[in-house]
Amino acid sequence: SYELTQPPSVSVSLGQMARITCSGEALPKKYGNWYQQKPGQSPVLLIYKDNERPSGIPERFSGSSSGTIVTLTISGVQAEDEADYYCLSADTSGLWVFGGGTTLTVL
Amino acid sequence: QLVESGGGLRHPGRSLRLSCVASGFTFDDYAMHWVRQRPGKGLEWVAGISWNITIIDYAASVKGRFTISRDNAKNSLFLQMNSLRTEDTALYYCAIYSTFFHTFDVWGRGTVVTVSS
């Protein structure tokens, strides 16, 4: 079955840049999307179609894509960015798959 | 807004039906999906249904046991869960698929399903 691979955890100092990667064989052909989930809350869409940001999402969140990897970048990490982050994409059959999730710790 | 209901405690092998009632948007314009999250684990897509019910998909883990359906007249989405297993224990979210974003946009708060003997 298709898998999207994320690092389980990323740590970054307050104000620094954080990068979270998501790799999958179909990503050159399928969009990658990113969600933020804080404890006890529903996921929130951060990035769609690899690099687009919905209105209301801070500019420090950005997305990029290169080959089989999509990347979420958080520039100038804030304390409130501490959360779990998930990538989402589809396999070649169009079935949806989430990455395993990355816990971002702000030091 | 999406509000899920119907969660509860069931023994393995039993059934449960989840509901998701939508408001504030034209329900029958949108495909809808179910996503679950096992305790302390990540998100897992479960099933999706197109606005006109012509396209229905399931994750391999639930195919043949779960049935997704919708009633556009009642702005409602359903998930019939049969032959429940302990690994189906999770928080179940319904979510809207946005054709603008090409992904899941709005999520409900979820309903908890516990399968245990």
Image (cartoon, grey):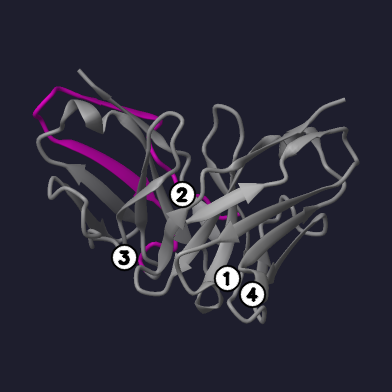
Q: Secondary structure at mark 4?
A: helix
Instruction: Give the CA distance from mark 4 to mark 1.
Output: 26 Å
Say which quadrant the C terminus of chain B sits in.
Answer: top right
Q: Which residues are magenta?
A: A1-28
Q: Residue lying at the far top in this picture: please name it.
A: A107
Q: From the viewer's perspective, is A48 left or right of A41?
A: left
Q: Secondary structure at mark 3?
A: loop
Q: Which residue is mark 1?
A: A93
Instruction: Give the CA distance from mark 3 to mark 1.
Output: 18 Å
Q: Are marks 3 and 1 in contact (CB under 8 Å)?
A: no
Q: Which residue is mark 4?
A: B72
Q: Chain ID for label 1?
A: A
**Residue drawn 42% across the image and 28% down it:** A39
Q: Is residue B83 magenta?
A: no
Instruction: Give the CA distance from mark 2 to mark 4.
Output: 33 Å
Q: Which residue is mark 2?
A: A4
> Label 1 amino acid?
Ser
Residue B62 in the image, given as x and y percentages of width and height = 74, 52
**Residue drawn 42% across the image and 64% down it:** B103
Instruction: Give the CA distance from mark 4 to mark 3.
Output: 28 Å
In front of the other: A8 or B32: B32
- Please tell me which of labels 3 and 1 falls first in the chain: 3
> Label 3 amino acid?
Lys
- Dot 2: few (<14), some (14–19), or many (≥20) neighbours within 10 Å? many
Q: Secondary structure at mark 2?
A: loop
Q: Which residue is mark 3?
A: A49
Quarter of the figure with residue A33: bottom left
Instruction: Give the CA distance from mark 2 to mark 1.
Output: 15 Å
- Dot 3: few (<14), some (14–19), or many (≥20) neighbours within 10 Å? some
Q: Is residue A4 magenta?
A: yes
